[in-house]
Image (cartoon, helix red, strand yellow):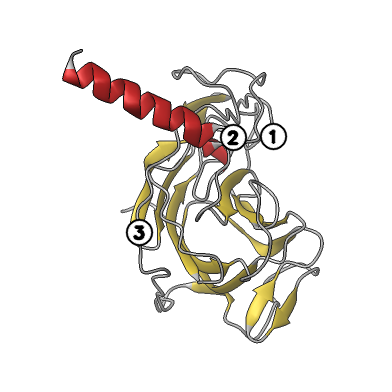
Amino acid sequence: MNVNLAMWIVLAATGAVARAGIKGYPDDPKLPGVPYVVHDPARPQPPVVGTAGAVSVKPPSDAIVLFDGTSLEAWTPGWVIRDGVMVATKNDIQTKQAFGAIQMHFEWRVPAGRKVDGQTGGNSGVFLMGLYEVQVLQSNHNMTYPDGQAGALYGQLPPLVNATAPQGEWQSYDLAFEPPVYEDGKVTRPAKLTLFHNGVILQNGESYLGPTEHRKLTTYPATHPAAAPLRLQFHGDPVEYRNMWVRPLGKRD
């Protein structure tokens, strides 16, 4: 047997075993440009990359601090502060201020010892403009459908790699987001995301297909706000956040 063919068979078999038992939705709508559906449990898992955990970055002088460990004043009510960290406790919360294009940094953690299984136990998310989710999930030793892993454009695009540190350790996200551009009621440039997780790039200027949906193939709406609040998702799990700040990104002169 050809060596390359034998190697391909071994890798395919390994992938099939690795994907066995993953909960997903094989009958969901097909995604454009790839042979997979939304939340496809058979989609190949991103390679695992070990990291040292969170890269902590202090807010630049022109940053808007959303959480510094002392106050939730920037947010609508719903979550609490425990030992200097913001803890998801019930409903989604959102910023009182609206944003468009931004640079954003935040750190997050799923408490050690909590049972995590796929999309349950360690799940949250950040919705840019309240519409475009960046998935927050404990993905270290936790397999799920790839477009639902940590750093995924949820329901649309998996991360390049799985760079999540072990449960109980702090993680960091550094991202740059651009809203879609409309001309005459049509999208001429989609919303775009660049994302680093623990210093490792997961999304390199990738495009959203439209606002985030669950189990649906999304499209862009006919109209779109220029700015909107950031939203943090409560998915039933006490995910913790700290050191959160943003920098609005204007156009160069």
Q: Sequence order check: which comes first, mark 3 or mark 1?
A: 3
Disc 2, SS: loop
Disc 1, SS: loop
Give me the C-alpha separation between circle 3 and circle 1. Answer: 29 Å
Contact, CB < 8 Å: mark 2 with mark 1? yes
Residue 157: tell me if it is visible.
Answer: no
Provide residue 152's location: percent of width, then percent of height: 51, 43
Which callout, 3 or 1, points to the residue nearer the camera? 3
Identify the residue position indicated by label 2 in the image: 155
Contact, CB < 8 Å: mark 3 with mark 1? no
Give me the C-alpha separation between circle 2 and circle 1. Answer: 7 Å
- Between 183 and 240, which is closer to the camera in this rendering? 240
Task: Classify residue 178 as left or right of residue 96.
Answer: left
Is the N terminus in the top left, top right, bottom left or bottom right quadrant?
top left
Provide residue 155's location: percent of width, then percent of height: 59, 34
67 lies above or below 70: above
Type of the residue with mark 3: Gly
Residue at left offset 39%, top offset 76%: 60
The residue furthest left is 3
Quadrant housing residue 229: bottom right
Identify the residue position indicated by label 1 in the image: 214
